[in-house]
Image (spheres, rainbow, N blue to C red):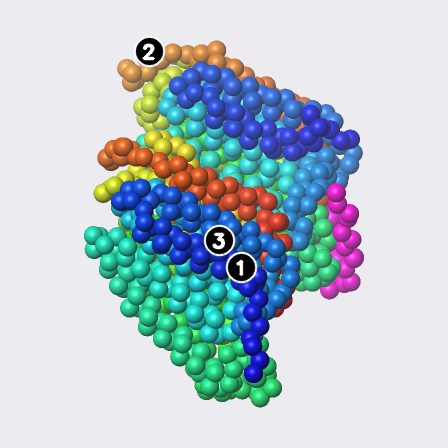
Amino acid sequence: MKLPEINLYLIAPEIILSVFGFLVLLLDVFSAKEGKKGYLAILSLIGVVIAFFFTLPLMGSTQTGFEGMFISDGFSLFFKVLFLMIAFLTLLISMGYAHREGIELGEYYALILFATLGMMLMAAGSHLITIFLGLETMSISIYILAGIIQEDRRSTEAALKYFLLGAFATGFLLYGMALIYGATGSFYLKDVASHIASKNLLRNPMLLMSLVFLTIGFGFKIAAVPFHMWTPDVYEGAPTSITAFMATGVKAAGFAALIRVFFSALPAFRPDWTMIMWVIALATMTLGNIIAISQTNIKRMLAYSSIAHAGYILVAFVAGNDLGTSGILFYLMAYAFMNLGAFSCIILLGKKGEENTLLSDYSGIGFKYPLLAASMTIFLLSMAGIPPLGGFMAKFYVFSAAVKSKFYWLVILGVLNSAISVYYYLRVTVLMYFRESEREITGLQFSPASVIALILAVIGTLYMGIFPSNVLTFAQRSIAGLM
Amino acid sequence: MFMSILGIPILSFLIFFPLLGAVVLLFIDKQKLETLRVVTLLLTLVEFFVSLPLFFIFNSKIGEMQFVEDYWWVQSYGISYKLGIDGISLLLVLLTTFLTVLCILSSWKAIEHRVKEFMISFLLLETGMVGALVALDLILFYVFWEIMLIPMYLLIGVWGSPERRVYAAVKFFLFTMAGSVLMLVAILVLYFIGAKTTGQGTFDVLELYKLGIPVETQYWLFGAFALAFAIKVPMFPFHTWLPDAHAEAPTAGSVILAGVLLKMGTYGFIRFAIPLFPKAALDLLPLVCALALIGIIYGALVSMMQPDLKRLVAFSSVSHLGYVMLGMFAFNMQGVQGSIYQMLNHGISTGSLFLIVGMVYERRHTRMISEFGGLSKVMPVFAIFFMIVTLSSIGLPGTNGFVGEFLILLGAFQSNVVYGVLAASGVILGAAYMLWMFQRVMFGKVTNPKNEKLKDLSPREITVLVPMVILIFLMGIYPKLFFSKMDVTVEKFLKDFKGKVEMKADAPQPKVTAELKK
């Protein structure tokens, strides 16, 4: 019997995150009473930064480990950088917020680290079980985080709803994976692909079923229509910092796994899933945008907007060329900056017992909190795809990929959707700048950490819009081995 | 040939100087209104005086782009930061920097609250306008084209008249946005056509001019570009945002909207839509001319019926821009030159009209024609300026309007007599609504007691109007000064156009060579 090869160096970032997660849990037990746990957040931040520095040296080479169950290639490393960045910003946003809302618990920070770990595994899995384990690690952490404000009924409802539907979707996913195993006899993505090619399994009913189940499972995680029903309620009810984390991190992880599985294991079925995804992309964009128009709560509005963004990203997925895949990576990064930024604006505008998440609360803040409103405007315009912001470049790459593959109608419908979306993003700016405030929002305490997160997000959004070259080159290099 | 200021090439300087100015304003206390105004005025004056030498250094014997700057922006995608001006954009850039100064000067008293934000928006708008006029890369152009939207949206929405400003601002934004996203798709399609034929994708307009695109595809692409530009011009039936935006915007906003932003539409046709898709432009000529003629006559008729001074001027813009489009699509020397000249004229005459309406509004806080009457007795100096501007707008010989309209009509008659006849009838209507309006506002007895004690123009207001009047006469009496700058450019435009139309679309393409960039 051969011992499995073990290369701990490959999973150093993951190990560091787990160690810091446990360390936070441990220290939490020994630390004093509530209200003095800010240092746990700082410890988590340090963990993320160290993990980041252990990710960097892995760049530039493709290595597999653990009997090929784990792969460290450009694609997974890009996502690891992205997830660590998202975790970093989420932790920064959380520091003031968690303290304010009384959820500054050790497990809060530890779970963020564990969820990040799960995301990283999802991106780095070259074996269906690895991907599934990553997905579960992430999901279970997020279920708890969504409901961590125990006194708040909406938070609990969000957690329960997310858990029930999420478990159901996971079931589909697992069933899909089992069917793949049944048809091809392997969990390794590469082996699955070669089996399908060599045994000509293109019309195998089990595989076709698994295609559908996988689409459902991943569609749930990325909040694609018609598997999006949970999104608005969960985004609204969950703590705002966690909503930001879900909208960026979970979505990105879902896309990472979706791309990995479909492009590596099931490329032979491209004509089939292109057709399904074409419809899903269009439905996701259109439904997200149209329902977002009628929202009165900004968190719900951003929930529907995040559905719409999943639709734009799926346009690039449908395109299926290397432009599209690097476009997806670019999009997810730009989206992370602008969305985390927007949510940190929402957090900064709230205070204990007064969340101020109704759109009408934004009336007149444009001249009262000029910098906050200006940042919010930047994020919203970026989401609307107005140059020279990151969101524009992201949409530009995504749509150009689809034009290249000649999906003209999808692109035209996509840009028209983007024009529709301008309406509801603009409405927030209308309220902020053109209307007088209906009631005074006073006594806001700007937590320094959230402000830093906000500044970083502004810089990121502008940088990706004005100097997109570097990130784009990074994204293009990252997908080299994948396509 | 190359000119730079403090080591920065002049066109880049013109784009980014207002942006820098906006950053400077951020650090000025918002309570110090006077300082904010003076600093902004100085910034725009510097901008204007930096742009002015372009007029004299510009080599009018060359039809090619001048003052070209060319760097990569996103190299892997073939997006470049490429700037340059020819005889057409030269004049429009000068118009922009010139009007911006007057706009700031005219907002001295009119803008009392949120002065700092107003000035910042205006400077950002100037960056967008200059950028869009000098950009020679489609993506760069698109970026500046969209950047213009946001400050203008804020100008209308924050400082507009209270009743319907939000509606007007959102309508303005959505109309323009809806048109431009389709243009973006067309730009992408064009990029991939270029990449396929030449092996190297580029967004450089000058390179893309050389492509021979199948006629069938040209129709689609021209349609997408033309829609974006037609909304901006605005051509009938896409003009409905214009009266709202104009009526609600503050004076300076209306001036810059009429003076420069509308020109972006016509400029877009002449720089992008026509040279890129010449065959489609030629084939769709009857449609464009018909819409232009409808615009001329419809705009004039609606103007005549407007009870509101500002809406009257706004609809007159629809009519005037119809002439610009008609002249351009005559595709002969007179028509195109007249069209470009009329773009400048409209900026000056209609800009002045908006300034004048603004001055009346500041005194009476109403724009209803019925509220006025007999103002010439109360405000004699004002009456003189108003008269000159009105006559220029009608196109009286000796003023700038005459030269432009005359050339356009000449061009239109040469291309199609019916177009000429119909357009000429628009001139009569134009005289009718303007003179009627002038008579109702200025002549007769002072019927409304509120008008008896109105103050005549202040020295500041005279300072705003005098440069306009000087230009009105200068352009009317000595047009050669301006035509000499654009002669060669227009000749080249027409030569290229005719060359491409006659060339068969499926003929072998000249291999495009990508130049080595810095």
Residue B265 pos. (x, y %): 55, 42
Residue B345 pos. (x, y %): 57, 30
Q: Is the residue A126 above or below the residue A456 in the image? A: below
Residue position marked by numbered label 3 in the rendering:
A84
User: Tag 2: residue type?
Assistant: Lys
In the figure, is residue A426 to the left or right of A325? left
Mark 2 vs mark 3, CA separation in Å: 70 Å
Element under disc 3 = helix
The question of residue B508 being in magenta is answered with yes
Residue B99 occupies quadrant: top right
Residue at (59, 39) in percent of width and height: B132
User: Tag 1: residue type?
Assistant: Ala
Element under disc 1 = helix
Residue at (41, 12) in percent of width and height: B456
Residue position marked by numbered label 1 in the rendering:
A12
Q: Give the residue at the far front of this rendering.
A: A30
Circle 3 residues within 10 Å: few <14, some 14–19, many ≥20: many
B235 or A136, nearer to the observer: A136
Mark 1 vs mark 2, CA separation in Å: 83 Å
Residue A46 seen in the current view: yes
Residue at (55, 43) in percent of width and height: A463
* Residue B453 badge: 2
The C terminus of chain A, quarter of image: bottom right
In the figure, is residue B377 to the left or right of B232? left
Q: Chain of mark 3?
A: A
**Which segment is the magenta one?**
B494-518
In the figure, is residue B212 to the left or right of B269? right
A133 or A441, nearer to the observer: A133
A138 or B128, nearer to the observer: A138
